[in-house]
Image: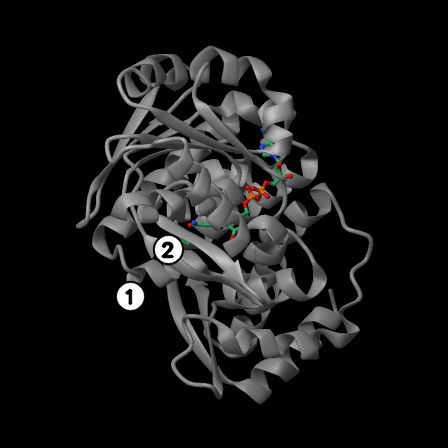
């Protein structure tokens, strides 16, 4: 197993990557405390032996799978069960699942008794490569994603690529969305993705790249844990991505892929992203989208969904849309566009997709 340490100003998180991380860390982490496990209905059904082996006798809360359950009602139900099962301040919460479970589990552990220890065990590629690391926790509120949450570092993250064996191709595509985002920020990751398109579903290749992406994220979070500057780079494609995700009911990774596709084209058009590099990035994104294509999305009304970008957390005022975009290899920048210009440009590029 490989170890990556993330030394954030608020706390240190130890990240272990490798299937042996489960056997090496879980017996230690579950030994003394009363434990609480949060997972979703799909993961619970797929991995009965995992739960039996490592969490026999622990309190297990199984949330119905799906982004629609990342809300206040679920959070309240989780916190109530934590309380009635007698969790103490020294207890640990283990979040076993994709980004939905990681986000809501992280927030529950931040809130219960003002903060108990959280261990993330991500089971989707997206969660392994991105959401389980960095301490962003949240639930959605109405139409706005991740608007209620906290920065709260997990104590440990155990990344076991073996979980990816049961992941549908569509979810691999979603994880590749976040990996390509790292490619947009790091020339090395960009080249690895570009040179190995035939290995995008190969576990050994993905495992190496998971480490590279986590290391990139860890260094950024160490420098800017609360996203006052550099951490905004980890939102490349996300302004439009979140809007599309909500309006079209896509999953997060798909929203990010479409968001990066359109925002990169907008950035090239604005002269902000270098053309030749931007076109290579667009080609990578299109390749990922083609891995598990959706039935042709109807983007004719995308201008309406552009309004959702008005609530993006990066915006400075109500009339301007803020986007983190790739500039050239290894460089990114913020692009601010008046809303009307953003809406027109998005409509143009989305209708050409
Ligand atoms: P998800 O948690 O909904 O998982 C996707 C699907 O895969 C679900 O149906 C789940 O049950 C299933 N699944 C999970 N593990 C599986 C496995 N091993 N085999 C088969 N199926 C499995 O979604 P996600 O894509 O993992 O995460 C998206 C969420 O993460 C969004 O809510 C997004 O906002 C959040 N996110 C957070 C951060 C962060 O920094 N905190 C970053 C990116 C995304
Ligand atoms: N996924 C973006 C971040 O963690 O900042």
Callout 2: 10 Å neighbours few (<14), some, many (20+)?
A: some
The local secondary structure at tag 1 comes to: loop
Callout 1: 10 Å neighbours few (<14), some, many (20+)?
A: few
Q: Can you give x and y, in whole percent of width and height, for residue 143 in the image?
A: 59, 68
Q: Which mark is residue 330?
A: 2
**Residue drawn at x 68%, y 72% as measured from the top left:** 349
**Residue drawn at x 76%, y 76% as measured from the top left:** 301
Nearer the observer, 115 or 297:
115
Snapshot quadrant of residue 13:
top left
**Residue drawn at x 57%, y 62% as measured from the top left:** 241
Nearer the observer, 36 or 21:
36
**Which numbered disc, 1 or 2, marks the residue that appears first in the sequence?**
1
Q: Can you give x and y, in whole percent of width and height, for residue 284 in the image?
A: 60, 50
Q: Can you give x and y, in whole percent of width and height, for residue 174 in the image?
A: 60, 45
- Establish whether ligand 2 lies closer than 8 Å to the Cβ of label 1: no
The local secondary structure at tag 2 comes to: loop
């Amino acid at each position: 197993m490989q170890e990556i340490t993330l030394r954030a100003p608020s706390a240190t998180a130890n990240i272990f990557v490798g299937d042996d991380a489960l056997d090496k860390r879980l017996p230690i982490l579950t030994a003394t405390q009363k434990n609480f496990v949060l997972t979703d209905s799909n993961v619970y059904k797929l991995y009965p032996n995992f739960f039996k082996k490592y969490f026999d006798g622990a309190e297990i809360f199984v949330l119905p799978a799906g982004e629609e359950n990342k809300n206040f009602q679920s959070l309240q139900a989780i916190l109530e069960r934590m309380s009635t099962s007698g969790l103490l301040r020294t207890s640990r919460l283990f979040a076993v699942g994709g980004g939905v479970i990681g986000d809501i589990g992280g927030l529950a552990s931040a809130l219960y008794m003002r903060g108990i220890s959280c261990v993330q065990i991500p089971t989707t590629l997206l969660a392994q490569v991105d959401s389980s690391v960095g301490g962003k926790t949240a639930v959605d509120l109405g139409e706005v994603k991740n608007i209620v949450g906290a920065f709260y570092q997990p104590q440990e993250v155990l990344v076991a690529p073996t979980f990816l064996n049961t992941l549908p191709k569509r979810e691999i595509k979603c994880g590749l969305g976040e990996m390509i985002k790292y490619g947009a920020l790091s020339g090395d990751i960009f080249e690895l993705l570009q040179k190995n398109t035939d290995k995008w579903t190969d576990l050994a290749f993905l495992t190496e790249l998971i480490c590279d992406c986590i290391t990139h994220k860890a260094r950024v979070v160490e420098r800017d844990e609360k996203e006052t500057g550099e951490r905004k780079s980890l939102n490349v494609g996300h302004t439009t991505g979140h809007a599309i995700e909500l309006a079209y009911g896509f999953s997060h990774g798909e929203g990010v892929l479409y968001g990066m596709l359109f925002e990169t084209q907008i950035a090239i058009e604005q002269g902000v992203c270098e053309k030749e590099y931007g076109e290579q990035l667009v080609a990578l994104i299109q390749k990922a989208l083609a891995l598990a294509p959706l039935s042709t999305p109807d983007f004719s009304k995308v201008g309406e969904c552009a309004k959702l970008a008005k609530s993006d957390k990066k915006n400075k005022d109500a009339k301007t849309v803020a986007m983190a975009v790739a500039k050239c290899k290894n460089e990114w920048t913020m692009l601010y566009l008046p809303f009307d210009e953003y809406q027109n440009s998005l409509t143009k590029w989305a209708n050409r997709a």
